[in-house]
Image: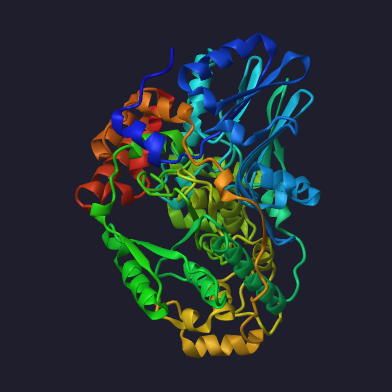
């Protein structure tokens, strides 16, 4: 018998509006296949399930919305989303676009941008990959006779329950995650709140075989290391590449391009690329204005729209219906990201998004500090600091970085947080959002040691990475956009832009920069996996309120054996209630604490 029916509102969203990007890939031995398939049949719609025989009687079970649209059985392939090959200047969209891409592209999936999940099965093994940046989350787990990769901790937890497998709390990881810092918003390394479920940092794929679920690690810090050319040449090529990816999205037939704009520097680069592409279709601009923190962004976005004659949609509090928000979060982000992600009622049907996220990986978000310096600045209580240090030092070692290195903070962000933080803003609804500022050449440049190159912006520092890199990109594409007012003073005005262009050789030409596109967005299913949404609905999370978030978390609170860990989570709850109460913040924008406490539900 199928799992609990969705509520009327959730069912309407599942069938018509909310597009949750969920996938589950299970490799199962003959003797346990019936149990896996029965569990999936109880919870998922038949059209969301594909079962493919492997050698020796094993099977691969793939669960995803309208799954056959993303599976090609003869080629042994599942692909959902789109891949960006910046080296070959192309986008491969959907499974047919992926299979039609050059062999060199498909064989080098390690280095591809975009947002995608891909699986390939040969003989009796399955390899599961995703984009280089980790925008598409990836977790792994295994039990007797089965192994799985998925983007949802809830799905893996309930699969373990169905297979009679133990799931135990990792209280050291849980304690470390109570640090009230953005670094603790995502997994520190491969650990999660459950010992039996592992998170896959960027640069990690998963091999499912008869022995279990194994991480195939090629650290992103190594992938994005290596030599670079001079600053001027790299920046000019990168600016042209950014415009090329944006041009490809603007030229997609049957899709509406939508750019999420803010008052900051990063999305300004994307807007500058749009303006540089004379004659190209203009995207719809969208800005959040749902809380006080958004006021400055909304004001600057309106001035940009007025100045450049573009349509702007401002999302106000009354424009959003948060019914079903907790179900969406449980199905997608719970346990991997302490935040509620994207608004559950965002309309993404027929939309290909564009965002300015990505520059954080090279502009020096943490100031190129050692991990020891960061740790001192956090000033954590001793017991929490010990847990924090153990988990984070292990995560740094896994990507070949020493805690005392001057790039330790930026390396940790690149490997363990950047992709999840980026994807949290859209993957819950659709994989189809382009992040053209995610560029390997810029990461390599930002991580390079300071030199005597006369084109470098700013004062000497250990590494080249600096926010002025972002200002240079915008200036190279549209001096007028680059010098327009920002939400706060970023040290960039018309004089600075002119001076930098004199150093960089003037604006870049982008007339023929557009990337090639193989495949179509229409071939990418956008609906939710019925499996994930039914499992989330069965948790009965309630309305999108702090009371409901607390109720969810209390289901797992008593599963914590160590009193200090329970006490820390009660402090997290207190912080969450202070944010939504005394500070008056809407739950959606109340920081990490509400979701962090609610994620304890995964322990129950």
Which residue is at the front of the view, 418 or 9?
Answer: 9
Does any portion of residue 39 appear in the rendered image? Answer: yes
Q: Is residue 568 visible?
A: no
- Which residue is at 54% across, 43% downward? 188
Whether residue 236 is situated above or below residue 351 in the rendered picture:
below
- The colour scheme of the drawn protein is rainbow
Residue nearest the viewer, comparing 229 with 21:
21
Give the residue displayed 35% in from the left and 26% down from the top. 6
Number of marks in the rendered image: 0
Residue shown at 36% from the left, 44% from the top: 344
- Horizontal and vertical percent position of residue 601: 38, 28
Query: Could you say which quadrant of the image residue 28 lies in?
Result: top right
Seen in the image, is 326 located left or right of residue 222?
left
**In the displayed structure, would residue 457 be above or below residue 559?**
below
Q: Which of the 4 image quarters holds residue 89?
A: bottom right
Q: Is residue 22 left or right of residue 95?
A: left
Q: Position of residue 213 (x, y in %)?
A: 67, 27
Quadrant in which the C terminus appears:
top left
The location of residue 279, given as percent across then percent down, is: 55, 75
Residue 320, image x, y percentages: 29, 50
Image check: 137 left or right of 349?
right
Instruction: Pick whichever, 522 or 345, lies toward us.
Output: 522
Which residue occupies the extreme left position in the image?
A: 582
Query: In the picture, which quadrant includes the N terminus?
Result: top left
Residue extending farthest to the top is: 31
């Amino acid at each position: 018998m199928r799992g609990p029916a969705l509520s009327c509102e959730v069912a309407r969203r599942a069938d018509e509006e909310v597009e949750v990007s969920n996938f589950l890939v299970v490799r199962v031995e003959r003797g346990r296949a019936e149990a896996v398939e029965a569990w999936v049949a109880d919870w998922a719609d038949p059209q969301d399930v594909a079962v493919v025989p492997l050698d020796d009687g094993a099977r691969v079970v793939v669960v995803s919305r309208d799954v056959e649209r993303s599976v090609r059985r003869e080629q042994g392939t599942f692909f959902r989303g789109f891949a960006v090959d910046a080296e070959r200047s192309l986008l491969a969209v959907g499974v047919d676009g992926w299979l039609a891409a050059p062999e060199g592209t498909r064989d080098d999936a390690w280095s591809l941008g975009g947002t995608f999940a891909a699986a390939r099965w040969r003989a009796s093994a399955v390899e599961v990959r995703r984009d280089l940046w980790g925008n598409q989350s990836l977790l792994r787990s295994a039990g007797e006779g089965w192994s799985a990769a998925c983007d949802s901790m809830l799905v893996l937890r309930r699969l373990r329950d169905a297979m009679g497998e133990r799931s135990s709390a990792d209280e050291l990881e849980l304690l470390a995650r109570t640090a009230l810092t953005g670094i603790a918003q995502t997994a520190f390394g491969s650990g999660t709140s459950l010992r039996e479920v592992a998170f896959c940092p960027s640069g990690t794929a998963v091999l499912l075989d008869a022995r279990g679920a194994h991480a195939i690690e090629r650290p992103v810090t190594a992938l994005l290391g290596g030599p670079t050319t001079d600053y001027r040449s790299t920046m000019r090529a990168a600016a042209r590449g950014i415009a090329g990816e944006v041009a490809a999205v603007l030229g997609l037939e049957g899709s509406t391009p939508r750019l999420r704009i803010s008052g900051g520097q990063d999305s300004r680069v994307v807007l500058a690329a749009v303006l540089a592409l004379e004659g190209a279709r203009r995207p719809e601009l969208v800005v959040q204005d749902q809380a006080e923190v958004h006021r400055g962004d909304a004001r600057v976005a309106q001035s940009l729209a007025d100045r450049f004659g573009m349509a702007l949609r401002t999302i106000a509090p009354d424009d959003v219906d948060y019914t079903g928000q907790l179900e969406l979060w449980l199905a997608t982000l719970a346990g991997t990201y302490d935040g509620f992600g994207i608004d559950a009622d965002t309309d993404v049907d027929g939309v290909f998004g564009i965002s300015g996220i990505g520059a954080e990986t090279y502009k020096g978000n943490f100031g190129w500090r050692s991990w020891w310096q960061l740790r001192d600045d956090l000033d954590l209580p001793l017991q929490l600091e010990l847990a924090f240090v153990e988990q984070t030092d292990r995560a740094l070692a896994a990507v070949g970085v020493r805690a005392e290195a001057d790039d330790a903070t930026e390396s940790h962000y690149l490997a363990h947080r950047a992709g999840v933080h980026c994807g949290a803003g859209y993957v819950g609804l659709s994989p189809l959002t382009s992040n053209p500022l995610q560029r390997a050449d810029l990461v390599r440049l930002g991580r390079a040691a300071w030199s005597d190159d006369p084109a470098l912006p700013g004062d000497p520092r250990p590494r080249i990475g600096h926010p002025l890199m972002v200002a240079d990109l915008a200036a190279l594409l549209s001096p007028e956009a680059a010098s327009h007012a920002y939400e706060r003073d970023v040290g960039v005005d018309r004089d600075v832009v002119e001076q930098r262009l004199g150093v960089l050789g003037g604006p870049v030409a982008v007339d023929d920069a557009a990337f090639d596109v193989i495949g179509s967005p229409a071939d990418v299913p956008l609906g939710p996996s019925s499996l994930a949404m039914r499992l989330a609905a069965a948790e009965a999370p309630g309305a999108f309120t702090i009371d409901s978030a607390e109720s969810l978390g209390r289901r797992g609170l008593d599963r914590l054996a160590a009193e200090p860990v329970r006490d820390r989570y009660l402090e997290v709850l207190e912080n969450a209630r202070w944010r939504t109460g005394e500070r008056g913040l809407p739950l959606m924008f109340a920081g990490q604490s509400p979701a962090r406490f609610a994620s304890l539900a995964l322990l129950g």
